[in-house]
Image (cartoon, rainbow, N blue to C red):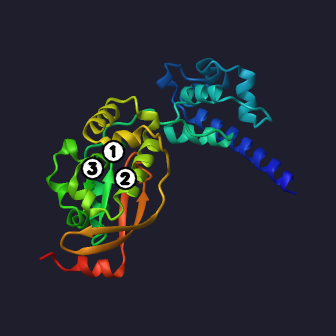
Amino acid sequence: MQVEMAVDDVAQRRRELGGFLRSQRERLDRAAYGLPPAGRGRTTGLRREEVSYLSGVSVTWYTWLEQGRDIHPSRQVLDAVATALRLTDAEHDYVLSLVGLAPRPVVRADAVDTAPPHVQRFLDALDEHPAYALAPDWGIAGWNRAYERLYPGVATTSAADRNLLWLVFTDPSVRSLLDDWDDTSRRFLAEFRAEAGPRLGDLRYRDLVSRLSAASTEFRARWNEHGVGGFQSRDRVFRHPTLGRLVFEHHQLRPSDQTDVQIVVYVADAETRTRFAAPAS
């Protein structure tokens, strides 16, 4: 039974791939490709032969793709077809997913220095829960008032140094704020390495690693350990200079329309929320 279900699933995905490619081909503007109208003055839709020519894939192979035949297209073939059909990034990854291929790796991302307005509004709406937004290089791109209350230095640090890794390894106030600095700094570094791997050749990443290696012997030693790890929600304890011991649940979110930005939220327990409710003396 499980084998039959697996076969049916593969067949369904092949049919979906064929239908999707056909619908994308039929909606294309011929003039955008420098092609004249087709039969009866039709201005939309490319012929299979035209997609074959543009992608460098044989007409027979492309036809089989649209027919949902039991074939096994390579990533190279699907990438070429996606380019010829001018698919968006989401559409391209969808095509790859239908044949069981992983999404294309992110090689580089545009710099994000300030959180997009809708992300900042979300941070502000979290109210008593400290939250901040991280750029791909872990620069702190936005934060709410609760986070500034937890760590006032975020507002006074220069933009060049307002990077989570830089602050964790070089700011004494952050070290004293973290109840488990040794564990947290190792976790952060392992998470950063896992996320930044495809981008480590970019200038922003090279400069950050170089600066940290020069500024912190602990960073240099741990970076050379090559630790890699994924994010895990967990309890976080902070030793605040005026509010005392604070306990939060640590969560991470990524906006679906801004996936290069990660939002970190500290959900306060009841006692911590009570302390955050009153202005600091």
The spot of residue 54 in percent (x, y) is: 58, 19
Mark 2 or 3, nearer chain start: 3
Res 169 seen here: yes
Marks 1 and 3 in Cβ contact (< 8 Å): no
Front position in the image: 261 or 20: 261
Front position in the image: 172 or 50: 172
The spot of residue 25 in percent (x, y) is: 60, 32
The spot of residue 68 in percent (x, y) is: 75, 37
Circle 3 residue:
141
Front position in the image: 59 or 268: 268
Circle 2 residue:
185
Disc 2 on helix, strand or loop?
Answer: helix
Q: Amino acid at mark 1?
A: Glu
From this view, report whether residue 4 is shown above or below residue 236: above
Q: CA distance from mark 2 to mark 3?
A: 20 Å
Image quadrant containing the N terminus: bottom right
Q: Is residue 23 left or right of residue 232?
A: right
The residue under the point 59% across, 25% down is 80
Outermost residue toward the left in this view:
281
Q: Amino acid at mark 2?
A: Ser
Quadrant assignment, res 91: top right
Mark 1 or 3, nearer chain start: 3
Q: Amino acid at mark 3?
A: Ala
The residue under the point 19% across, 80% down is 278
